[in-house]
Amino acid sequence: MTKRRSTKERQRQIAQAALELISEEGVGGFTTAALSKRVGLAEGTIFRHFSSKEDIALAAIDLLEERLRESFPDEEGEPLEQMGLFMRHRLQLVVAHRGVFRAFFSDQLAMIAGRDGVEKMERIKGESVDFLRRCLDEAAAEGKLRSGVSPEFLLRVIQGTVHGFLFGSGPAEEESQPQNLARRTWSSLVELIGR
């Protein structure tokens, strides 16, 4: 006999399925029919757990935020090391789940989630940018950045690198070995930005 899932477990399952659908099919593939098929529920049953498709998208954003928060280092440390931990984790996520992050950075996911989703995603993006800026400012203050290059310029280079992996098409190796790609990319960035 199958154990009945709690509402919280079912909501998480539905949010995860929404992220998978968006990753595989794009935002257009995020339908309640496809979602119900993926989680093995009748289409109407999904709305016992969520009041609207917008609420499902908000739960998916919450789940994505949870995964993104894992990339923030736990402890204080040397700024470039902290940034390296952060960037390697983020690049792995981006490469492994391009569809989800394309929807995230193109604001398509936020449009499904409505005004609350837009605000939440802007806050998530802002926290990441603030973390990178803080690390770069600290590294600059400690004399660990290449001279003549501002932290703000380097922030744009780093953001551009992430967006390049996100929106560019890369070799199949990227999908099969995101950890190696993330490590190589960060090593290259450190050579570019560091002394």
Image (cartoon, rainbow, N blue to C red):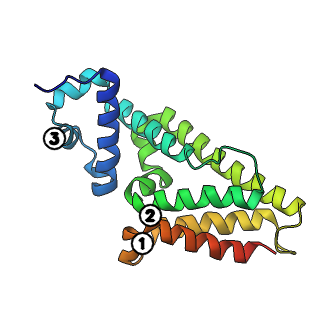
Q: Are marks 3 and 1 in contact (CB under 8 Å)?
A: no
Q: Nearer the viewer, residue 61 or 78?
A: 78
Type of amino acid under label 2: Val
Residue 174 pos. (x, y %) = 42, 72
Residue 101 pos. (x, y %) = 45, 55
Q: Where is mark 3, residue-wise?
A: 37
Give the class, few, some or many, for how many residues have Cα within 10 Å of label 1's Cα (few <14, many ≥20): some
Q: Are marks 2 and 1 in contact (CB under 8 Å)?
A: yes
Q: Residue at x 89, y 61 (%)?
A: 142
The alpha-carbon separation of the residues under discs 3 and 1 comes to 30 Å
Split into 4 quadrants, where in the image is the N terminus? Answer: top left
Type of amino acid under label 3: Lys
Type of amino acid under label 1: Glu
Dividing the picture into quadrants, the one containing residue 78 is bottom right
Mark sitting earlier along the chain (3/1): 3
Give the class, few, some or many, for how many residues have Cα within 10 Å of label 3's Cα (few <14, many ≥20): few
Mark sitting earlier along the chain (3/2): 3
Name above or below for residue 94 compared with residue 180: above
Mark sitting earlier along the chain (2/1): 2
Q: Of circles 3 and 2, which is in front?
A: 2
The alpha-carbon separation of the residues under discs 2 and 1 comes to 7 Å
Residue 108 pos. (x, y %) = 42, 49
Q: Where is mark 1, residue-wise?
A: 174
Q: Residue at x 89, y 66 (%)?
A: 143
**Numbered label attached to residue 95:** 2
Q: Residue at x 68, y 65 (%)?
A: 156
Q: Secondary structure at mark 3?
A: helix
